[in-house]
Image (spheres, grey):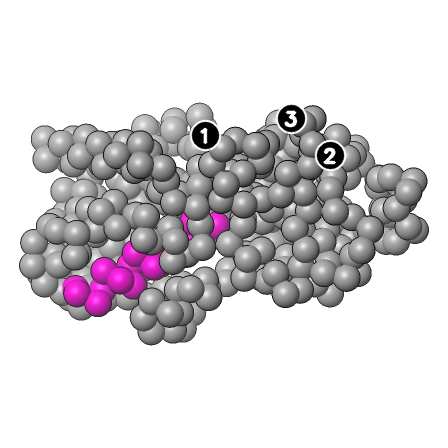
Amino acid sequence: MSQSKRMLLVSSPLLAAVLVLSACGGSNNSNGEAGGSGSIRIDGSSTVYPLSAIAAEDFQIANPGIQVTVGNSGTGGGFEKFCRGETDANNASRPIKDSEIEECASTGIDYGQLIVAIDALTVVVNKDNDFVTCLTTDQLTKIWGPDSTVANWNEVDPSFPSEPLPLFGPGTDSGTFDYFTGEINGEEGLSRTDFTPSEDDNVIVQGVAGSKGGLGYFGYTYFEENADKLKAVEIDSGSGCVGPSEASARDGSYTPLSRPLFVYPSVQALTDPAVADFFQFYVDNDAEIAKAALYIPLSDADQAKLATDFDALMTQANNL
């Protein structure tokens, strides 16, 4: 999992894939001054990782007495830990599954769903690929379907050259994998298996960048960070070719690969003042955090809903 370039400008460089940060001082406000000491544990989606990592890093500037740990084991792997009570919140690039809802219920974990940003899941090819500018959703299904044996670009379209087509994508614990396969192949988890999978988006970047005919997919942030070596492919879902961007994700024209990004805090964890203050800071500064992470901020209406949803969660926590 890479760090956001923008994140490095927010404060000090991050030294590991698992971020350990500290926090200090005051009461629940948008500056994040919490007071006291404690620890907060977050895991889950590598796509949402930059958002929570930036929130944690900025929060600790004012609060050096609270330790915040942000991991990136993937949406599914993160929910396994979350539903066992090992973490206070889970980052997710897809909604929680029925099986995960049941698992959390079995262990008595209550939670809330907070939408914190918008992503445009991006299909990428090598920067030197001069023959692919747009793919239809049918062509993506032809490439990524569970029965696909496509191994050359001219099998996708006869007008494309005879060029090997190595594939790179998120691992099966990734919410990005779930979302992409659900939208493109019609069922979450339904995919060909002969591709190079990784929970680390940097591995996908390096794979596509190192293969002239390579193709992969991941969140928009990682394309923006690597636009010097990758090219984003426009997607045609029936209404013409549209590329990933803030405008196309917001207006719905970048279908079907624009999606919300989530954080799921535990209601029980929010009874801890340090956890409550951290997430209040996250919500109050969500637009700035999304911009810093190079994601698409929520609309004003969705930002207001985020605040309302968090207030409802805090009411639940305060009633425990």
* Residue assigned mark 3: 186
SS category of the residue bearing label 1: loop
Question: Which secondary structure dominates the residues rendered in magenta?
Answer: helix
Residue depicted at x 77% and y 35%: 139
Q: Is residue 230 visible?
A: yes
Residues tagged 3 and 1 counted as in contact (Cβ below 8 A): no
Quadrant of the image containing the C terminus: top left
Residue closer to the observer: 241 or 150: 241
Is residue 142 on the magenta stretch? Answer: no
Residue drawn where x is 33% and y is 53% of the image: 289
CA gap between label 3 and label 2 equals 15 Å
Whether the magenta-drawn stretch holds residue 48 is answered as yes
115 displayed left or right of 136: left
Amino acid type at image mark 3 = Gly
Q: For label 2, count other residues whose C-alpha is less than 10 Å away and answer few (under 14), some (14-19) or many (20+).
A: some
Residues marked 3 and 2 touching at CB (< 8 Å): no
Q: Position of residue 109 (x, y in %)?
A: 28, 34
> Residue 231 versus residue 148: which sits nearer the camera?
231
Residue interval drawn in magenta: 46-63
Whether residue 84 is visible: no
Q: Looking at the image, is 21 positioned above or below residue 107?
A: below
Q: Nearer the viewer, mark 2 or mark 1?
A: 2
Residue depicted at x 64% and y 26%? 186
Quadrant of the rendered image containing residue 21: bottom left
Q: Which residue was labeled with disc 1?
A: 97
Picture coordinates of residue 176, whole percent (x, y): 55, 42
Between 14 and 41, the residue placed more toward the observer is: 14
Q: Is residue 171 left or right of residue 64?
A: right
Q: Which residue is mark 2?
A: 136
Q: Amino acid at mark 2?
A: Thr
- Tell me if 316 is positioned left or right of 112 in this view: left
